[in-house]
Amino acid sequence: MATFISVPLKKSSEVDLVKPLSKYITVSYPAGEEQAEYVRAVDELNKLRKNALGRPLDKHDSSLEILLRYYDQLCALEPKFPFSENQICLTFTWKDAFDKGSLFGGSVKLSLASLGYEKTCVLFNCAALASQIAAEQNMDNDECLKTAAKYYQLASGAFSHIKDTVLSALSREPTMDICPETVGTLSLIMLAQAQEVFFLKATSDRMKDAVIAKLANQAADFYGDAFKQCQYKDNLPKYFYFQEVLPVLAAKHCIMQANAELHQSALAKQKKHFGEEIARLQHALELVKTVASRYDEYVSVKDLMDKINRALTAAKKDNDFIYHDRVPEVKDLEQIGKAALVKATAITPPLSQKFTDLFEKMVPMAVQQSMSVYGQRKNETVNRLVGTMREATNLCNGVLASLNLPAALEDLSGDSIPQSIADKAKSIVEKGGLQSIEQLIKDLPELLTRNREILDESLKMLDDEESTDNELRGKFNQRWNRTPSGDLYKPLRTEGTNFRNVLDKAVQADQVVRDRYNAHCDMIALLCKPPNELSAAIPSANPTKTLQGSEIVNVLRSQLAQLEEIKKERETLEGEIKAVTFDMSVTFLTALAQDGAINEEQLSLAQLDKLYGSYNERVQASLRSQEELLGQVQVSHQEFSSLKQSNTEANQREEVLKKLASAHDSYVEISNNLREGTKFYNDLTEILLKFQNKCSDIVFARKTERDELLKELQQSIAREPSAPSFSVPAYQSTPAAPVAGPTPAPRTVFQPQQPQQQPKAQPPSRPPPPNIAPQAASATPTSAPPVGPPTNNPPPMAPISQAQGPPYPTYQGYPGFYQVPMGYNPYPYNMPNMAFMPFQGAPGQGGYPGAPPAGQPYPGYPQQPPQQQQQQPYYPQQ
């Protein structure tokens, strides 16, 4: 039986997981034990990858367990980190498992910044290693058979999973080993081998022939499907791997079909259908002979052929002598049933039995995103409630300041500082006075400039990389097949535009605060002066002591006290609103586990309404109470003003007191605005630094990817021919007429250039045999050799059609023996540094007749045509 088919592993390049993941963790999570735990988990993940992919793996269960653990960890990791080209950019490089590469070009490989690509390649290696472990099992052992069947089904399921998910996981065309048609074929092969293992198990357990026949027929069907899919795909047969696999698949298809016929013939024998038995055995024998004749190099079927031959011989003998049953045609036989006991294992992580998520406490990205949006919704709700209360308080202060309350009630003497003004002046001095505001105003431009510089530098990095990418794209055209930087940077540019708009709005808000400060700075400065200077700056007026005991004054004071109480309640309410907390991660995790998705808007709005609904009602009640009290205060103030003695001094004093009260309120508001602005710029600096790091990371990853792609392009260019094909001249492409005799040894193609010398005279051609009449054997030999070399050599002549030597005589008593005289060498000119040795006649041998004079041909010898004089000599010349 043939050895089982296994799949080679893919090879990966080393990737540093620690730096980008740790950087993301330190940026996204606050410093503490949780962050340190996640950083340690990243180190463990990096070690796990090196252990799974950075070393040769043994064909053992422990090695497969490591691969499965790494795959499970990738699946658990994917929803918890934002792996993408414009966030956490990790570039994974994998080589084609079937492409052996070339001397100059190297193996085919693909680099992608995609965790889905990494998962696909790791799962491919899981399937390949499972097939190798299964192929190494001892098929004579029951436990090994079970192990092989389990791993073949796992490999089939893994390849099938890759077929269904590879195109959605990758943004580019995959390499040939993981393309859908390839892994689909491999999945069928693994399933066929799993079915064959079940057939072997049934055979070893001596199950019924009917069952074994169905198992074998199903295996033959699987092998046939795999063979067809492998044969008819355009790209697969070009790989050496599939060139080796094709004959094995064809052989196993025939072998499994022959086994099915063999066991079905035994079933026919039990039913006493002896003709059917013989027909099936004959068909099985034909199938096995086909395998032996075509695929004997890959599969040995000697044992199976002997078994079928024995059964066929016995069946024919019994039928010829006893039963005489008619042997039907193969086409008339009933089809053998099929029984598929194998199924591709569904790939549902975790696949490893020992898997423990290194980032178990980290919530998935979907929950993180939902938490982020929930946080924004919560901040909006809090800001809306707090802003509403602050606007109401400012409105109240403005109305009271316009009515000069409560200073008008305290200034009945007309010449002293009202207590409320004195308290406000003291409050401003305690808060730092003008100096604190001026320092805050001075710091804002510096903070703004720093933020602008960070933003401009970040966008400049994107611009420079995009410019380089466009330049290379214009240079290489279609070969520059990576994602354009302009498309990749769209989210980052949108984010950068939003930051710039925020900065522009902040500048406008800063100007509003600065204008308000300029409008009230004089009165604020007056409040910062000592009490005696402040009292002197306030105009005096006639006393209005008659109003001190009036009922309207008491009513106004009561109403103002109620307004102060409302303000204090708002401060308490604001603190309570800001202190509300709720962990929505549990709610989002529950929704994700139950529904597979999170309806963030519905869940967030419901929870926020539950948390802040009562606070919203209290804020609205406070607004209604204030509105009612302000209306009462205005009515009471009109009555109070009608009782007061009105004069110019009193009006001036009241106007100054109003401005002082308004200046205090403006000071408080300006201080709060400036502190909020400072905090805003500092917070924005941290956000912009994160944005800058994100831009820096993606630009660095793009540069790495660019260098890899340039290297691949250089290799592909090196593999291409340096010039287009051209037609060779006829005199170079048409070889000369072959000359009989041995092929001369080739000379060195490239020889060092020698100084030009005068061409040496070529030696003469060997003379043809002379035409001499035969003589008696007792006389001199029939063809007398020449006595010696000619004294005058003739000019070079073209060689004859065949190299011939002189017709040496046959001596009596030694037929067929030709004695070459000592020292004779017919080609002395080819021997360097050897002097020409003239022919010495041997005793008993006559010499050639004298050579003709120089320049004259031999008499009676036909001359060569003139054009043959151009022909090159047969033996190469120096």
Image: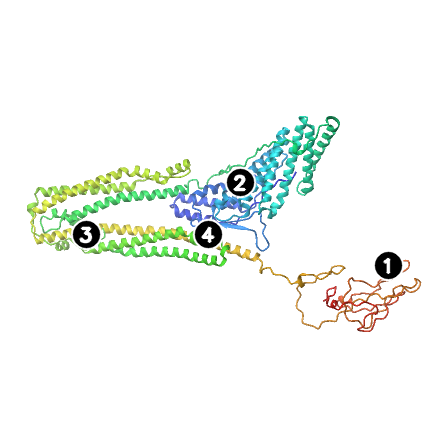
In the figure, 119 relative to 529: above or below?
Answer: above
* Dot 2 amino acid type: Ser
Task: Return the x and y of residue 792 as percentages of the image width and height.
Answer: 81, 73
Q: Identify the element where label 1 is drawn.
A: loop
Locate the N terminus and report the quarter of the image it occupies.
top right
Mark 2 vs mark 3: in front: 2
Let me know if residue 697 appears in the view. no
* Dot 3 amino acid type: Ala
Task: Return the x and y of residue 662 as percentages of the image width and height.
Answer: 18, 51
In the figure, 460 relative to 116: above or below?
Answer: below
- Mark 1 and mark 3 residues within 8 Å of each other at the beta carbon: no
* Dot 1 amino acid type: Phe
Work out whether mark 1 precedes mark 2 in sequence or the reverse, and give the earlier one. Answer: 2
- Quickly name the residue at label 1: 817
Task: Return the x and y of residue 424 as percentages of the image width and height.
Answer: 18, 49
In the figure, 438 relative to 641: above or below?
Answer: below
Q: How far, Cα to Cα, is label 4 from label 2?
A: 28 Å
- Quickly name the residue at label 2: 160
Work out whether mark 1 precedes mark 3 in sequence or the reverse, and give the earlier one. Answer: 3
Work out whether mark 2 precedes mark 3 in sequence or the reverse, and give the earlier one. Answer: 2
Q: How far, Cα to Cα, is label 1 from label 4?
A: 84 Å
Work out whether mark 4 precedes mark 2 in sequence or the reverse, and give the earlier one. Answer: 2
Q: How far, Cα to Cα, is label 4 from label 3?
A: 59 Å
Q: Nearer the viewer, residue 610 or 665?
A: 610
Q: How far, Cα to Cα, is label 2 from label 3?
A: 77 Å
Q: How far, Cα to Cα, is label 1 from label 3?
A: 140 Å
- Quickly name the residue at label 4: 483
- Mark 4 and mark 2 residues within 8 Å of each other at the beta carbon: no
